[in-house]
Image (spheres, grey):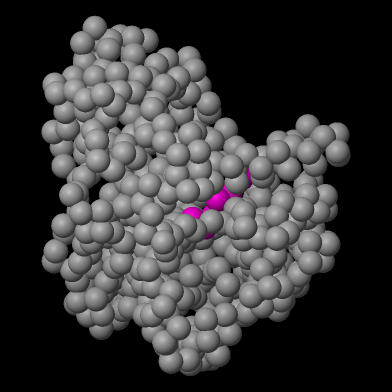
Amino acid sequence: MATTGLKARMIVDKFFRIAEVDKRIYGSFIEHLGRAVYGGIYEPSHPSANESGFRNDVKELVKQLNVPIIRYPGGNFVSGYNWEDGVGPVESRPKRLELAWRTVEPNEVGTNEFIKWAKEAGSDVMMAVNLGTRGIDAARNLVEYCNHPGGSKYSDLRRSHGVEQAHRIKTWCLGNEMDGPWQIGHKTAEEYGRLALETAKAMRLIDPDIELVSCGSSSSAMPTFPEWEATTLDHTYDAVDYISLHQYYGNRDNDTANYLARSMDMDHFIHTVISTCDYIKAKKRSKKKMMLSFDEWNVWYHSNEADTKIEPWTIAPPQLEDIYNFEDALLVGSMLITFLRHADRVKMACLAQLVNVIAPIMTENNGRAWKQTIFYPYMHASQFGRGVSLMPVVDSPKYDAKDFTDVPYLDSAVVYDEAGETLTIFAVNRHLSEGLDLTCDVRSFEGYSIVEHIVMEHEDLKAVNGPGEEKVAPRSGGSSKLDSGILTARLSKASWNVIRLRKAP
């Protein structure tokens, strides 16, 4: 195996455990925005559409991603949404002016249709309630509609809509990005904290088994961060199970070395939120540990200029349709690695979004569905990142970027599936011009051998995929070997790597 001067070392031991990986960190998000629903998952005129109007070709791609939970119906959309508009006979549903994105919402798809689709796609639903224009009453009624078995106004209304069995939705978001001035019904931290607490109490009186997510900051750059978390949790700490984080990154100045280091900002964001949660825990003398739901994350910047030119008050215009390149896939890989390294506190995460809107899956109206570059690291993590997240000891060369110092060229996470006796190493080489020789001590995994080494690489960092043209895709056959418990691997320059080991039978 050829070597260069760039070397990294890692020790992986099966007893150095962070936590069990909650499969819901591989969740996603569908909002009534752009072509996510209409022309995305739902297109009755499409050749692959089922009897309900949902595209089977899209659903099959979602199944490949093995998405455990999908947040719905927003997003900014939910802060002006009346859930009653989306239930009952479709022909009787109103068309509404949708103020968050200034479009017309036809309400052809609503609660029951989406939950049925998600179930067919193998996903649970993380339902969001409107705490912008509405509040306690609408939220409690929606829980009753979805989760109560029958014999009450809203549960019987659901049954009259042809849904006899309760949906039993487990996870609920108490609004969306309520710290943001752009949000319909934007609130101060005190206002939101009080409303979220009282809404949580009412929702739990109907169904004590639900789990609740309180709104955290819309990004780490918000001027109110992290005071927003401290103030809102002062109210909600005992009433909720998670606090949310949202973060998007871009490479507007075309500085790739700096861009690929942005997962370090995400890491700092997570650490700060954990510290704030633990401060409130100490302040309240609580024994409860608050968990994190990173329920919006992705790259988002390519489509910003195009979105300024959209004509308002149309149905499902192409909005937020970022076309992702290879370097975007590398950063998405590092963001997934960051979640795995925080598996003890980050228990849910939602790649925003799933189809057409800043998404791994794209469609043509009445045409093909295809995979963006970011599809693959997301799929690999979801497929192989189930088990216990381990804490590797890493020694990597580093570099300095415009906004970051001591950036490790090797970005890595390790997952051990004890039941399946498999070990998976996820690794990004951030170096843009040199390969990285990795030596990894895995002697605690006696009798293991390499199953495969998946690599995603491309000479052009700006290479993109398109319908019928997949320029960026993974391949097997990466350069790695295992001898006497020592794994050696060659990580190509600017590459995403998945090295899988399994115990021999």
Q: Where is residue 456 in the image (x, y as percent from the top left)?
A: 22, 44
Magenta segment's dominant SS is: strand
Q: How many marks?
A: 0
The residue depicted at 55 percent of the width and 68 percent of the height is 75
Judged from this view, the residue extending furthest toward the right is 284
The answer to whether residue 204 shows anywhere in this view is no
Q: Percent position (x, y) of residue 426?
A: 34, 34
| Residue 491 sits above or below residue 315 on the image | above
Q: Residue at x 49, y 58 (%)?
A: 248
Give the residues drawn in magenta, as a range.
Answer: 292-297
The percent position of residue 402, horizontal first and vertical second, equals 47, 48
Q: Where is residue 36 in the image (x, y as percent from the top left)?
A: 39, 72
For residue 71, side relative to residue 239 (left or right): left
Figure quadrant of residue 11:
top left
Quarter of the image where the C terminus is located: top left
**Quarter occupied by residue 466:** bottom left
Residue 295 sits inside the magenta stretch: yes
Image quarter hosting the N terminus: top left
